[in-house]
Image (tube, rainbow, N blue to C red):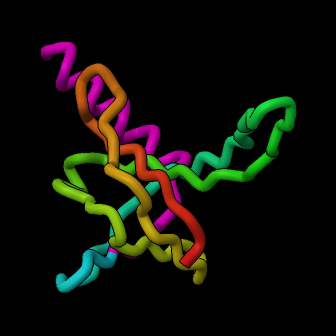
């Protein structure tokens, strides 16, 4: 077993345990059921001497489930809609999952 295949198996277990069901709706395409891991870190942004506190809505999704997410595509999770803003990123060293920065629709 290679390290990459082991990492993929561990990722699958993580999504099975901690993920939630979501519906991904690309613009002009058919909706797909996927699993995502929600991350909602607070972000502090400095502007001069002012600090602005904002909530974020980031979601991770496996590349094996979603080949090419795009900005302005829609995620529906527990009845709430989120629009992908900005380019999705693959930050992990093995490029096994996307990080999607979203905003409420």
Percent position (x, y) of residue 103?
56, 65
Looking at the image, the residue that sits furthest to the front is 48
Q: Who is closer to the viewer here, 87 or 60? A: 87
Magenta-colored segment: predominant secondary structure: helix
Q: Who is closer to the viewer here, 20 or 103? A: 103
Residue in view at x 60 percent, y 46 percent: 39
Tell whether position 16 is magenta.
yes
Looking at the image, the residue that sits furthest to the left is 1
Residue in view at x 51 percent, y 71 percent: 82
Locate residue 15 relative to residue 57 in the image: left or right.
left
Where is 13 relative to 28, above or below? above
Percent position (x, y) of residue 10?
36, 30
Quarter of the image with the N terminus in it: top left
Percent position (x, y) of residue 18?
55, 47
Q: Who is closer to the viewer here, 3 or 86? A: 86
Residue in view at x 41 percent, y 44 percent: 99
Q: Quadrant of residue 32?
A: bottom left
Tell whether position 23 is magenta.
yes
Percent position (x, y) of residue 81?
53, 78
Where is 96 relative to 2, above or below? below
Where is 83 relative to 70, above or below? below
Quarter of the image with the C terminus in it: bottom right
Total tally of numbered discs in the picture? 0
Which region shows up in magenta? 1-24
Where is 14 relative to 88, above or below? above
Residue in view at x 20 percent, y 49 percent: 64
């Amino acid at each position: 077993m290679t390290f990459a295949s082991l990492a993929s198996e561990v990722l699958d277990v993580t999504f099975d345990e901690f993920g939630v069901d979501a519906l991904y709706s690309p613009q002009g395409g058919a909706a797909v059921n996927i699993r995502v891991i929600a991350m909602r870190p607070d972000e502090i942004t400095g502007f001069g001497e002012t600090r602005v506190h904002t909530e974020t809505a980031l979601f991770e999704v496996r590349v094996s489930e979603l080949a090419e997410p795009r900005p302005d595509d829609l995620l529906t999770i527990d009845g709430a809609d989120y629009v992908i803003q900005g380019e999705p990123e693959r930050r992990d060293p093995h490029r096994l999952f996307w990080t999607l920065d979203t905003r409420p629709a």
